[in-house]
Amino acid sequence: MSGAAQDAEPRVAMSFYLEQVAGEGEDAEPLVLVGYERSLLGVFDGLGGAGGTVYETPGGRHAGAWFASRLARDVVAGHMPEVVGAGPQIDGEQTARQLAERLRKALVERLAEFDAPRSSLRSKLLKALPSTMAVAYLVRGETGGYACHCFWAGDSRLYVIDPVAGAQQLTSDDLRSDNDAMANLLDDSVMDNCLSADTEFVVHHRRVDLQPPFIALAASDGCFGYVASPMHFEHLVLSGLDGAASPDGWREALRSSVQAVAGDDATLALLAVGGDLAELKGTYRTRLDTLRTTYIEPMEEAERQTRSAQEQADELEQRRGALRAELWSKYKPDYERHLSADAPTPAPGSEPPADAEAPSDEEPKTP
């Protein structure tokens, strides 16, 4: 996968990497390896909550999540060609098992190198060197179609965007919830499978056959987890394409759009097959128009109406409070007529003698 042959169909490949804290990003750099017959896309998201243990190394001090994502990336980049083999057919399930074994071995060995004491805390949420993985291995067939072998663990995702059908999620999030993509934007569900050095995990496999033109991409949850809907994520990708004058412009548009909403590190790897940038813009423009008119604009109008209604409700609440205060100030003088008068005169005989001593808190003295 070192380079594309001269007779390959036009393609556009790109990636970006965003850190919330410079130098401490828990996502690894994305993988984008493009060849004529085979290409590889991958993202790896270290899980900071589960893997927050910090390790001191000669190369620096980082959380386990930071080390995990980078190690997973290195294993996939270094072992995938050997694991899948050079033949025309790929056994996806066997590849997934072998990949899991290589990853597990590397993570266990890395953890041992840290020589860190085992934590006394026992929780299913705490893991040693945890990371997600989403890898697309695309194999070009003799007729020009592609077999996309999807390998994943965790909640990073693989997508394909079709010019007619639009965005399609190719991987199932490893969450305890029911994997509804819209619900997952609102429900912060617990992850039930990820790469780790001290817990069992599974690398899933799914094969999807694709015909050009298509856009394949791998993304960590920082890319899609902060948008208003799955439709907005597709719109983010296609509107960036439509407004770009170059592949670099498309990448920067994607990066800026994700950065504007993301509350986490974010990585994305993308391969568009079946045209150069200008051809891809023309191919996807109808889909972009449909996406806008059918999904984005109605949702934005509903959001606008909601904001307007909320602003009106806030204004009415302020007016109600002001009116209440005004009417109370008008009503209050008569209502408190007797309360605001001087204190009532004591009844006859209830007054203490003039020479009476004031009560004392002191104990009586013994003679």
Image: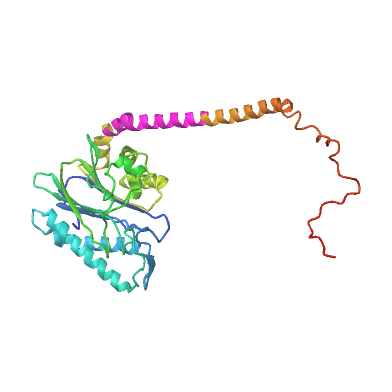
- Image height of 50 relative to 355, above or below: below
State which quarter of the image contains the C terminus: bottom right
**Residue at the image position 42 percent from the left and 59 percent from the top:** 22
Residue nearest the viewer, comparing 364 with 292: 364
Magenta span contains residue 35: no
Decide if residue 172 is on the left or right side of residue 353.
left
The answer to which of 353 and 227 lies nearer the viewer is 353
Q: Picture coordinates of residue 199 (x, y %)?
A: 26, 62
Which quadrant holds residue 244?
top left
Tell me which segment is drawn in magenta. 287-312
Give the image location of residue 60, x and y in percent.
39, 69
Q: Residue furthest front?
A: 367
Seen in the picture, residue 17 relative to 102 is either above or below; the reply is above
Q: Residue at x 31, y 29 (%)?
A: 294
Q: Which residue is more in the foreground, 334 or 136? A: 334
Q: At 66% across and 25% down in the image, what residue appears?
A: 327
Q: Is residue 303 magenta?
A: yes
For the point 86% across and 38% down, the residue is 349
Q: Position of residue 134 (x, y in %)?
A: 25, 53
Q: Is residue 342 above or below residue 43?
A: above
Decide if residue 332 is on the left or right side of residue 69: right
Marks counted in the figure total 0
